Amino acid sequence: MPRTLIALALAASLSATAIAAVPTPEQPGLAQIRQSDLRADIGFLASDALQGRMSLQPGDDAAAQWVASEFAKAGLKPIATDAQGQPGYLQAVPLVEYRPDAKATRLTLTRQGKAVEWKDPEVSGSFPTDQDVAAPVVFAGYGITAPELGYDDYAGLDVKGKVVVVFDHEPQETDAHSIFNGTGNTRYATGYVKVLNAQEHGAVAVLLAPEPSHNHPSAQEIRTRIGHHAEHAANPIPAQALADSPLHIPSMVISAAVADQLLSTSGTTPAALQSAIDKDLKPRSQALPDTAISLHLHNSSRREATTWNAVGLVEGSDPRLAPETIIISAHHDHDGESDGKIWHGADDNASGTVGVVTLARAFAANPAKPKRSILFAVFAGEERGLLGAYYLAAHPLRPLDTTRAMINFDMIGRDEQPSPQTDGLIQVPSDTGNRLNLIGAAYSPDYQRTVAKANEQVGLVLDDRFDHEYALNVFFRSDQFPFVLHNVPAFWWFTGFHPDYHHPSDTADKIDYPKMAKILKLAYLSAWQFADEATPPRFVSHPGSVEKH
């Protein structure tokens, strides 16, 4: 027998053996996960015809409509409401699209009657509406309020009507024993949460500064590592925001040199401030004498438009547990086209979109249904800031307090390889051909254990590296994160970065279809377990209280 046929026969026998170990009621759906379907569907979504699926462009609208039609064909229950008030598979997500005028962006410091002005790239920022803010400046440490950790940079600090300057990331980031999840990120590390927290304390703007001692790329450096920023330089991708965004105050990313000048009246240095906070986790927040700024942000264009989350439901079979929800999600948008090049987005994230559609078909076709209901959601606008996910989390179609677990697929189709995205920042294993990264265990070790148990039938190598690193900000870079903010046990399933990430060369022919099929089988079995187990995964709001594994 030719070697290829021997390999295929062996793969088939292993698959049959694995399926035989799966409970009989779950087997019909598992058999619906076929490489040939994955190949056909990704081939369509990543084709030139969809023009790179840029949010608010026709190609991405077509992708959302395709997902909705597949949910309808599979027989999922329509759970959204259309413009006529009828049940449907598309949840409208109202957006504002705008083009920041980088040349008009400026920050001016007034001190001792003299003005110092900075422009891009020393300062950068964007906001859906033009902004002119003038106010005194206050230093607010890392900008974190974490009562469960006994840490609050705003304790005793009056920031009402003021601009706050805060350090990026978190204290004690290189300390494996830090209460902030050791060397991993917590919910507090991201600028989104810092700006929201400043707003809640009455601040009128936020200036995000790199920590003087940082072991990760600054926000400015990150932009040079991701392909689409450089390749779209001649025609920048427009910014987008939710029309009802909870962020009502602007923010700017500032350079270390700007931060040094702003903090020069603090009586000490930025490095000393950081060192002191990191040493004892006591606030060093303070008003900055004779320090007032004016901030100016301007947009060259602005429009309101609508995109869609594609959603559908498989109802649970247990009357008592059916009101509870498991979410299986991904995002359908990518980076469009520019200068005759198409960003195909096969891995990012046609792979995840097809993963959700494949599992929707599998659960819908399975005669037996799990006890809890499963909501299938393919989000809009992830590349523009997790917009569809933030929208669904703010406008849930089923209660989040009874949402028991979330499986989020974002790039599940490739073998991880060293790339400019990760060079010098994280170690990539030499063999990633059977490896899956799971991100989120700090907030739910129970979830991790359930997946590991299901994986005994599948045999992938499960990797938690990204839960223990801070350089890549991975934890808050995909659509599970808005749900973690709502205390939902939510993991990002991710096969890792590669040199084609955010480049036109992320094409369908490079997808590892056998590996992707294994990942979807693991997700299918894990979702069944989440939906049926008597005690669903527990959410841990304070990762530092959990023994590190």
Image (cartoon, rainbow, N blue to C red):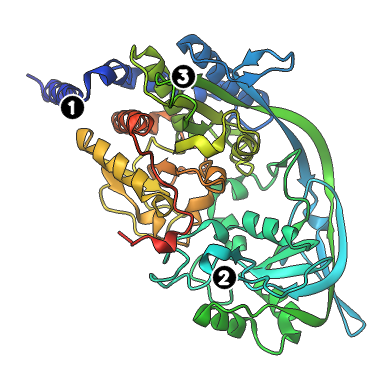
Q: Is residue 128 above or below residue 297?
A: above
Mark 1 in CB contact with mark 2 (< 8 angstroms):
no
Image disc number at residue 18: 1
Name the residue that disc number 3 marks.
315
Label located before the other in sequence (3 or 2): 2
Q: Amino acid at mark 3?
A: Glu
Between the C-alphas of marks 1 and 3, the distance is 27 Å
**Apparent side of residue 314 relative to residue 109 in the rendered image (left or right):** left
Instruction: Specify the quadrant of the image occupied by residue 341.
Output: top right
SS at circle 3? loop
- For the point 43% across and 59% down, which residue is it? 543
Image spot of residue 32 (x, y percent): 32, 17
**Apparent side of residue 224 relative to residue 263 in the rendered image (left or right):** left
Image spot of residue 46 (x, y percent): 50, 27
Image spot of residue 291 (x, y percent): 82, 79
**Apparent side of residue 26 relative to residue 399 in the rendered image (left or right):** left
**Apparent side of residue 24 relative to residue 288 in the rendered image (left or right):** left
Q: Amino acid at mark 1?
A: Ala
SS at circle 2? strand
Image disc number at residue 151: 2
Q: Of residues 499 and 479, which is closer to you in this image? A: 479
- For the point 68% across and 77% down, which residue is it? 285
Between the C-alphas of marks 1 and 2, the distance is 48 Å
